[in-house]
Image: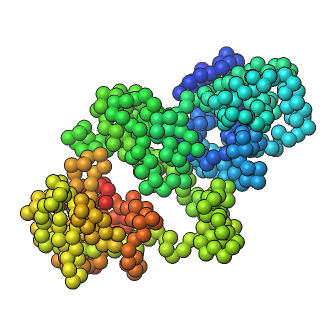
Amino acid sequence: MGEQLSPDEKLHLITRNLQEVLGEDKIKQVLTERELKVYWGTATTGKPHVAYFVPMSKIADFLKAGCEVTILFADLHAFLDNMKAPWELLELRVQYYEQVIKAMLESIGVPLDKLKFIKGTDFQLSREYTLDVYRLSSMVTEHDAKKAGAEVVKQVDHPLLSGLLYPGLQALDEEYLKVDAQFGGVDQRKIFTLAEKYLPSLGYAKRSHLMNPMVPGLTGAKMSSSEEESKIDLLDRKEDVKKKLKKAFCEPGNIENNGVLSFVKHVLFPLIGEFSIKRDPKFGGDKTYTDFDEVEKEFGEELIHPGDLKAGVEVALNKLLDPIRKKFETPELRKLSNTAYPDPSKNKGAGKGNPKVDLEGNPKVTEEDELVPSRLDIRVGKVISVEKHPDADSLYLEKIDVGEAEPRTVVSGLVAYVSQEALQDRLVVLLCNLKPQKMRGVESQAMLLCASIEGDPRRVEPLDPPEGSSPGERVFVEGYETGKPDDKLNPKKKLWEKLQVDLKVSGQCVAQWQDKHLMTKLGHITCKTLKGGNIS
């Protein structure tokens, strides 16, 4: 595609959505003569997260503009940055980064044959490079080195010499990779200006620099690998994505430091070109936006609810993450992930007869850990009576026959959506093997399963068993008819939470788990009207 574009069109693609460009005139000059050579480096420290889609979307732009792009896996930098990556893990982390970043690029349709991948230690340990490190060290003051790395290298009271070397090595990489420009976040600006100042002193050309804005994390600050709640890991399960987005800072009308809105701007629009939200017609109905400015304007005017914005991002993000998750389902890549980023708590006792880990310290997958819906004890129930909770105005006590000697007491707020009279003698669907929980002093012995529409708390409907069903009949997922339910679900394992995220209502109002029908021997479990709803 780049060959069909004019130099000005290429420049537009290269620089769009950037916060700052240093040396733009030099880039313009190169584009009139040949394709631009760009590199992006990433230190192989913490696990890459969804904010990495921001540089990936720019790499896609560079390729569309015909650029020659090199991706540097900066393993030596990772060690120099206050030993964020232990030496013995460097090779494993490089392998992990290469696999996960290639999976990211494939998920957004970037052809890998147009890219060059290189590891820092492939050239940074050469005689020539090492001599240049010494030459540069004789020119750069301690003050300039510390200042250059202030926003990138981990800052401590007594910095190691390694952290002071870091900015100089990044400057030298521009010469040894033979590029015209380096691309990075605006937090690296001081390293870029150090490179512009000192490379000519070594007799090397001054390069241009392309800087992305820093995308806020889910807490409103910079998205960071070291802050678990501020980032979504590329291998996070759908339920983790939902949970982290639910907690994300997204104040109504606030368009500043809004990580959810920034993700729409810097990832979804450049990669997909549009953004969709789904909502009830009385709140504006479904809408697809083709211009981010319109999204930002409507959110700022509170025409888009934060819950609707988050739900739209959740759907789009999971589409990007699905192929990455799928790639990492293989035993080889699962092992790579576990060994490159070992969990210290899982390594305790390895090789000492600990039955929960193998000889390499990796967790064993046991029958207890198997994630299958047959472990849920879901049954048909019949409401015998409904009465008000003695200590909570919004809660009611339902006595429900589930085919046992005594009815179970269920505490719920369902009467807010379905009248007390309509619930009487109604057939319902319940999850019966959760640990009983006290709700305002009354123990709830099961959970009523209902369909709901996210972002619209007023739309809730109980699930309906097939006509003619009897209390106590088992509800199963198609294809999982024979499995035996757990006696009681262990709350610490969060099995229900992990399975629940894939429970949905189809376009035909049929309850499903991963697109497989929930049913009894008489037919499908359904709801009245909430097509596409969630089940909880």
> Please, is residue 224 above or below residue 535 in the view?
above
User: Farthest residue in the bottom direction?
Assistant: 405
The answer to whether residue 406 is seen in the rendering is yes
User: Farthest residue in the left direction?
Assistant: 421
- Measured as percent of width and height from the top left, residue 380 is found at 24, 74
Q: Quadrant of the C terminus?
A: bottom left
**Viewer-side residue, 387 vs 122:** 387
Q: Quadrant of the N terminus?
A: top right
Colour logic: rainbow
User: Farthest residue in the top direction?
Assistant: 25
On the picture, is 400 further left or further right than 28? left
On the picture, is 54 further left or further right than 206? left
Residue at (17%, 77%) from the top-left corner?
A: 468
On the picture, is 272 further left or further right than 124? left
Residue at (78%, 29%) from the top-left corner?
A: 168
Residue at (12%, 70%) from the top-left corner?
A: 385
- Measured as percent of width and height from the top left, residue 418 is found at 14, 58
**Viewer-side residue, 470 vs 102:** 470
Residue at (64%, 30%) from the top-left corner?
A: 151
> Please, is residue 444 above or below residue 313 in the view?
below
- Measured as percent of width and height from the top left, residue 100 is found at 62, 50
Q: Quadrant of residue 51?
A: top right
On the picture, is 352 further left or further right than 443? right
The answer to whether residue 427 is seen in the rendering is no
Tally the marks: 0
- Measured as percent of width and height from the top left, residue 133 is found at 85, 31
